[in-house]
Image: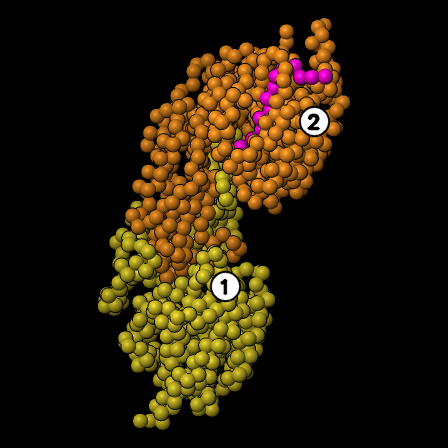
Chain colours: A orange, B yellow
């Protein structure tokens, strides 16, 4: 048994023994309501950043809070030999509404015993504070056992991931030298089927925009005007209904121009995963697949683009009834992108379609235009195989290369701006209810996640 | 000049002289936020009813507040010779949202000078407190001049007109004898084109229901689930989009079964009104007609049925973005009915269509089912011609028999339950913005409205 392996066992033991203290630290961080999308929570984002600076300092990093026009970044450095690793996570969280569907205060987190095991319940527990802390805690344990970390590490935490990361690209460009490492590790993803440790090599991109259409210049009495005046809610419904054809394809001009087909190799790998889509749907109370009729479930989730209305509203939405013919209708659209789809081109196609669809006397306005292209990782970097081995050692199932339907634009930015490969490894489960009420993170995810990073560090720094 | 005519002139003078005091009384009533549809305002509905009881007592009526399972009724009686007239109005008002579009507190009414003349600004000023008070003030002036009213009068005010009048039918049935008069006068309508005094002989009915559809049992991350899971907002949009065909006709099975064509006589009368639909649309910022392509504008507004979504919502509707694939979508539907259309049959057809349109693993639930059939007045009762003459004497234009797109179910109830004809006369203008922010009632409407009722009383009680 090599020295290194003895050291790893001690680190893993240290992680096991110190899990209660690590959990307490996570609960502290979860109590800070760092919702990035709502300006009312801006001060809490500052507090979360300060908390992380202090925590990184406690493990020996030179850490600072770095102002941006939006919420601050946190950057920390630990010097060392061997490869230079950058670890990325985000400390901001999604809004909590509808609040009435939560069983507890989303920002008063707690450990709950459930039939499926212990969970950490609260907003951000899985996305992404719990995941972020798995790496920090692995480093803490490593340092406690060995006196120092095994290599040079840069910690890079942002606070705008849930609101489109407006400050990220400028910050990366301005601090390119400081942030460039040999490889980036990103912990914001999940286990495949809540079980198989997974390294993501394919991520969908995102394009989005909010559309407001205005018909009559005020809300009208539906009796006095109904029949002669077009209802903006009907017009918006027609727009949304027209975005997909009967086969589930998106109808925007040129939408599929830059969408590649899967390689035979990837198709075979995904086939081997024997994804249980009936269970996937059953877990959310459904039995029927939606989407493109001629695609497999994993293709629909990982390698095909989508168009979703994330929110829609107009007219009277309170209790009781109000016979109004509303002036306005609103919808928030996002697209998941794949291959070489260009977010700006997709948003432009949506705008052209909306403008061609509204009556000539309607007005259309937009806000919140945003986008990030899809990302494809190169698995030729040796870190991929090192991480695959480390994860396979920790978990019952062997680790797999998979796709991801979500958009984690940071992976593409590391490649495009810093010319750095990124490896996405995370421990979330399908029922974590991220972005939803009652978000949780399994204690197993947290505990084995910390242990996984210790093993990855060991594999990557083996002499 | 007959004694009666001398009396009328004195009454009209009294109305002119006492207009400031009448206005102050109306402002008092407008300050009571008697929103009926929202349970939070229930106490204010009681206050409004109490205020009206006291005001009726001040003009010599035996008036009482009468409890119902919902908001109370106000009933007042004045004994007298000649015809027995029942006057109906409603003291409840529409909700005020969106509050930010009001230029003043909706329940802090005021007289405003505008380029088009003086207006009374505030929620309920036109619909219906201002209109209701025109009749009360006419009676007050008549009594002040003559010592008594010219005939037997029953005042009947309800507080649930804006929320579907759930207590009205039971109350009318339980108090049928007390509420039966020779004819009912209803003041809840407007001048044709804001100018021509109008007696409504045709009213659209109303059917409505709120629909909730549930797909996944929780809100989902649109990246993790998008492409494989159907979005309830898309499903609801498809439902709404499918309710009208390309010619503007409503597609529900059997929807037009009980819709009659206009008689040649009515069609000719409406043609003679030379309705300026371009101005009607221009006043609300529009230029294009919607609705059935093969119908005239007045047909669309008065004699053709409609389907409108009065409110729709689902997903994230706050500031910023949230990439959610929502669990639920909601829509409030109402239909304006004509002829013999049966509200229950129409609601059943909508339900059948919704249930046939959702995926088999979706859930559908309903609330707020309601309805009232359309009403057709018989103009053979002599009061119609008496009122037409009285109104023609007061206003520059001769009075006309017209249709009304709105639903005033009370007119049908008077006929069906009490076998009593009803005459709908009102003084609202097209730009009163009833049901909308910045509702107002012109001082001209209020003043000449009071004078109109004095003339109608005189014509109806002439020896």
Where A28 sits versus B434, above or below? above
Q: Residue at x 36, y 31 (%)?
A: A345
Locate residue B46, reporting x and y percent.
58, 70
Pointer 2 and pointer 1 on the same chain:
no
Pointer 1 local density, CA inside 10 Å: few below 14, some 14–19, many at least 20: some
In-front residue for pair A56/A388: A56
Which residue is identified by label 1?
Answer: B105
For the residue labelled by badge 2, is the local secondary structure a helix, a strand or a loop? helix
Chain for mark 1? B
Q: Quadrant of the C terminus of chain A?
A: top right
For the residue labelled by badge 1, is the local secondary structure a helix, a strand or a loop? loop
Q: Residue at x 60, y 44 (%)?
A: A99
Mark 2 and mark 1: Cα distance apart in space: 55 Å
Horizontally, is A289 left or right of B3 in the view? right
Horizontally, is A407 left or right of A231 in the view? right
**Is residue A379 covered in magenta?**
no
Q: Residue at x 29, y 48 (%)?
A: A360
In-front residue for pair B412/A368: A368
Residue A58's label in the rendered image is 2
Magenta region: which residues? A147-162
Where B20 sits versus B108, above or below? below
Q: Residue at x 35, y 34 (%)?
A: A349
User: Is any atom of residue A351 visible in this view?
Assistant: yes
Pointer 2 local density, CA inside 10 Å: few below 14, some 14–19, many at least 20: few
Locate residue B437, reporting x and y percent.
44, 60
**Residue furthest to the top:** A1
Q: Quadrant of residue B234?
A: top left
Locate residue A201, reporting x and y percent.
50, 19
Where B370 sits versus B4, above or below? above
User: Is any atom of residue B252 visible in this view?
Assistant: no
Chain for mark 2? A
């Amino acid at each position: 048994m090599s020295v290194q392996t003895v050291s790893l066992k001690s680190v893993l033991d240290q992680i096991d023994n110190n899990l209660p203290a690590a959990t307490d630290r996570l609960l502290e961080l979860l109590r800070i309501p760092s919702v990035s999308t709502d300006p009312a929570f801006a001060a809490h984002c500052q507090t979360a950043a300060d908390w992380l600076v202090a925590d990184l300092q406690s493990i020996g990093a030179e850490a600072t809070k770095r102002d941006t026009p939006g919420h601050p970044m946190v950057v920390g450095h630990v010097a060392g030999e061997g490869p230079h690793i950058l670890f990325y996570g985000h400390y901001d969280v999604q809004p909590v509404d509808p609040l009435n569907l939560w069983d507890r205060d989303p920002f008063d987190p707690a450990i709950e015993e459930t039939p499926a095991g212990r969970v950490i319940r609260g907003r951000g527990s899985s996305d992404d504070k719990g995941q972020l802390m798995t790496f920090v805690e692995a480093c803490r344990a490593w340092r406690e056992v060995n006196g120092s970390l095994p290599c040079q590490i840069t910690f890079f935490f942002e606070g705008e991931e849930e609101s489109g990361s407006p400050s990220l690209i400028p910050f990366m460009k301005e601090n390119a030298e400081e942030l460039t490492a040999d490889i980036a590790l990103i912990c914001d993803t999940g286990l495949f089927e809540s079980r198989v440790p997974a390294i993501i090599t394919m991520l969908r991109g995102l394009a989005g925009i909010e559309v407001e259409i205005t018909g009559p210049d005020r809300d009208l009495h539906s009796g006095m005007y109904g029949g002669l005046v077009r209802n903006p809610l009907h017009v918006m419904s027609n727009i949304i209904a027209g975005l997909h054809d009967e086969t589930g394809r998106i109808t925007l001009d040129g939408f599929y121009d830059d969408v590649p087909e899967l390689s035979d190799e990837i198709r075979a790998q995904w086939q081997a995963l024997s994804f249980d889509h009936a269970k996937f749907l059953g877990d959310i109370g459904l039995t029927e697949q939606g989407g493109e009729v001629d695609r497999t479930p994993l293709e629909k989730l990982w390698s095909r683009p989508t168009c979703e209305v994330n929110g829609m509203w107009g007219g009277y939405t309170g209790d009781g009834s109000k016979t109004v013919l509303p002036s306005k209708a609103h919808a928030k659209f996002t697209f998941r992108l794949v291959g070489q789809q260009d977010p700006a081109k997709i948003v432009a196609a949506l705008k052209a379609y909306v403008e061609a669809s509204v009556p000539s006397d309607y007005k259309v306005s937009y806000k919140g235009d945003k986008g990030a292209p899809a990302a494809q990782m190169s698995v030729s970097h040796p870190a991929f195989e090192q991480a695959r081995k480390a994860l396979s050692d920790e978990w019952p199932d062997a680790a797999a290369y998979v796709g991801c339907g979500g958009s984690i634009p940071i992976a593409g930015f590391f490649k495009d701006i810093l010319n750095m490969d990124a490896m996405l490894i995370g421990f979330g489960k399908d029922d974590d209810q991220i972005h939803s009420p009652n978000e949780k993170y399994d204690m197993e995810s947290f505990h084995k996640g910390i242990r996984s990073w210790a093993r990855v560090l060991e594999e990557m720094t083996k002499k």
